[in-house]
Each structure stands twice: as C-alpha cells, then as structure tokens.
C-alpha cells in the first residue's frame, strides 16, 4: 500500500504528501493511496462510509497543480480516473466490497467530470457486481446506465445548439455519414433553424434514431456554404424528408446493427454465466473463460439443463444470423470498401460464427 496522501482541488490532483519527484512516472503511488483530500476534506478509501461520503467536485474551475514531471498528468490526474484505478487495485487484492464501493463513487463522479466517459466505462461496475453475485444491484445499475445514455445524446445536442443561439446564430448544419439510420438520413445535409425563427429553413426538432447519430454543426451563411458542395442550400434543406440512402449505405447500417447484436450477446453471456454458476448445482464450467471457449456442441448440449433452471443460453435465430453476418465482414475488415461490403452481405454463408468467435475473443469483456 502506498503511504502517499493525494490532494485534489476541483477534481484534479494538486499535489501529494510527501511530494513526488515525477508525478507521471510515479502515478501508481497516488493510484494506490489510502487517504485523499478532496477540496479540503479528508477521506479514507478503505472505509466504505468514508468512500460513500466523497463530495462530487466542481470540475470546470481550472486548477494550477504542483505536480512536476516529464509529462503532463492529463486524464490520469482526474479524481474519477484515479478512483477507477484504486478500485482495480483493491479488486486485484480481492477486497471486492471495497472495490465496488470505490468504483460506485467513481461512476457517480464520472457523470460530472469533463472526461468523456463511455457506456462501457460505466459497465465495468455492472460486470463486477455480476462477478460478486450481486445481481439485483447490477440490473438496477444497468437500467440507470441505459436511461443516462438514452437521455444524454439529445440533452448534449440541445445544449450544443443552445450555445450556437447564444453566439448569435440560429442556423445549424447536419452532417451525415454512410452508415446512418433512416431517421438520420431524412435529416442529413440540411440547414435547420434552431428556434424556428428563420422560416427559410426547417425547424430543428429532437428525434430518436438507432445509430450513432449525425453531427449538427455551426452554420454561418457566406462562410459555411461550401460544406454543401455548391448546391442551393435553401432549396436543398427543404427537400422532402425521405430516407434517401443507397443500398450500400443501408448495408453499412446493417453492419452497425449487427455489431450491436454481437456486443449485446457477449454481455449477456457473461451475465448468464455468473447467474448459472450461482444457481445450478454441479455447474460444469469452472470459469467464465472456460464457458466462453466451449464448443458449439457443448453449449447446445448444456442448453436443456440450463433451461430447467430458467436460463436460455442459446441466441435466437435472428441474433445468430446477425452475428454470422458481422463476423464475416469483421474478418475481412474492409468496412471502407462499400462494394466489398455489399458483396459480402449478398454472398454470406452460414459458418461457425457466434460459437467460433465467442471462444476466440472472450477476453473482450474482461
């Protein structure tokens, strides 16, 4: 255990006591620190009540640190990042309850941080809760994550557009991409009036989609016109709202949806493993790795036993087809070549697919 006390201001490492000579090169020392001071209050990272009492800092106020070193600390100096590293250190030492408490607090703080955390970063807590057989807590937290990210995209978009209005522009340009969904395709490459005040353009309205979403950028008449490649941007913006994707673009979108199915099945496998291990007597798979490596025949053979205990471990037919499509394209890794993707989707043959790949890349969820 490190005897370092780490001191933070506004969510960023200010210094340590005793001081380090190179904070970046010796960052493991404050990652492992038991005691921290955040905005003047001391906390013990090996006492659950103290961990739970850590106040969320105000990240947006700049901090002048006293941390010399060869490199800038960057993200590695953020309190939320350091707590994640501390949680992993505790996990490696088999102090699981403490690791969960620290990671839970890290996830709470991450929501307010200026670091751009992803859904997968939050899912680490769900995975650890499953490993510890805390299934109800895991499911509850996953619902929070789903809500947080479904609401987040529209909220972020609205905040960005509001800033454009505050800067004096009521116009925004939507920029599409090849793999977008039908709803994004209807709205791509248009100028919108954010407030609806400029009647030359359609008013921007929030909408839901099933892809990554398209980008809405700042549009300045006279300076941004070239982004629409010489078309009459007023006429072009008022064209019919229809799905005008090409066949190749629809295949690109199908690839994206298949990847989501694939990733969801990998997550589901991990959850099922820990629930079955906890529930079924004489469960034959000793570790998640051994379960992920099991052959197609062995998984199908065990499916009937699992079903007696309420577990359906086989993918649905449509899910398996989606995974087979995804793996076929993924192996060739020619996503940028539209004609190649079209040919691959048209000429798909059923292969081991899901079962073969579930063994080969089981570590991707660890």
Image (cartoon, rainbow, N blue to C red):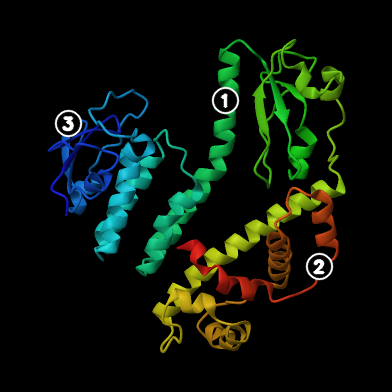
Foreground tag (3 vs 2): 2
- Left or right: where 185 falls relative to 209: right
Q: Earlier in the sequence, mark 1 or mark 2?
A: 1
- In the picture, the disc for residue 41 is none
Is the residue 293 above or below the residue 189 in the image? Answer: below
The answer to whether the residues at label 1 and label 2 have Cβ atoms under 8 Å apart is no
List x then y, in percent, for residue 249. 80, 46
Image quadrant in which you'd find residue 232: top right
Circle 2: element type: loop
Residue under label 3: 40
**What residue is drawn where x is 35% and y is 29%?**
59
Residue found at the far front of this picture: 70
- Callout 2: few (<14), some (14-19), or many (20+) C-alpha neighbours within 10 Å? few
Residue under label 2: 348
- Callout 3: few (<14), some (14-19), or many (20+) C-alpha neighbours within 10 Å? few
Image quadrant in which you'd find residue 199: top right
Q: Earlier in the sequence, mark 3 or mark 2?
A: 3
Is the residue 145 above or below the residue 203 in the image? Answer: below
List x then y, in percent, for residue 272. 50, 72
Residue under label 1: 160
Image quadrant in which you'd find residue 326: bottom right
List x then y, in percent, for residue 79. 30, 39
Quadrant of the frame with the C terminus: bottom left
Foreground tag (1 vs 2): 2
**What residue is drawn where x is 13% and y is 37%?**
17
The answer to whether the residues at label 3 and label 2 have Cβ atoms under 8 Å apart is no
Spatial CA span between label 3 and label 1: 33 Å
Circle 1: element type: helix
Circle 3: element type: loop
- Left or right: where 181 falls relative to 296: right
């Amino acid at each position: 255990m490190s005897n370092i006390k780490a001191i933070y201001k506004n969510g960023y490492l200010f210094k340590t006591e005793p001081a380090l000579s190179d904070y970046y090169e010796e960052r493991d020392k404050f990652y492992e620190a038991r005691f921290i001071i955040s905005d003047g209050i001391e906390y013990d990272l090996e006492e659950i009540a103290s961990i739970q009492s850590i106040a969320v800092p105000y990240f947006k106020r700049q901090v002048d640190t006293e941390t010399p070193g060869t490199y800038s600390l960057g993200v590695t100096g953020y309190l939320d990042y350091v707590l994640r590293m501390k949680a992993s250190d505790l996990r490696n030492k088999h102090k699981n309850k403490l690791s969960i408490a620290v990671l839970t607090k890290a996830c709470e703080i991450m929501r307010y941080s200026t670091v751009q955390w992803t859904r997968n970063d939050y899912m680490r807590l769900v995975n650890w809760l499953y490993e510890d057989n805390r299934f109800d807590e895991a499911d509850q937290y996953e619902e929070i994550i789903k809500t947080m990210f479904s609401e987040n995209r529209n909220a972020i978009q609205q905040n960005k557009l509001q800033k454009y209005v505050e800067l004096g522009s009521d116009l925004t340009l939507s920029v599409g991409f090849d793999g977008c969904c039908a709803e994004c395709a209807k709205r791509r490459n248009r100028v919108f009036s954010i407030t609806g005040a400029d009647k030359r353009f359609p008013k921007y309205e929030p909408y839901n989609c099933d892809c990554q979403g398209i980008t809405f950028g700042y549009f300045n008449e006279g300076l941004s016109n070239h982004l629409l490649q010489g078309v009459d941007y007023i006429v072009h913006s008022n064209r019919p709202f229809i799905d005008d994707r090409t066949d190749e673009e629809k295949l690109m979108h199908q690839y994206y949806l298949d990847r989501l199915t694939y990733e969801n099945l990998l997550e589901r496998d991990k959850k099922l493993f820990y629930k079955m291990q906890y529930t079924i007597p004489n469960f034959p798979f000793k570790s998640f790795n051994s379960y992920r490596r099991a052959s197609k025949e062995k998984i199908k053979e065990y499916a009937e036993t699992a079903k007696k205990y309420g577990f359906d471990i086989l993918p649905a037919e449509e899910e398996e087809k989606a995974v087979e499509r995804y793996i076929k394209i993924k192996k060739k890794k020619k996503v940028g070549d539209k004609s190649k993707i079209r040919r691959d989707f048209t000429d798909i043959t059923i292969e081991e697919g899901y079962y073969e790949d579930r063994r080969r890349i089981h570590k991707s969820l660890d």
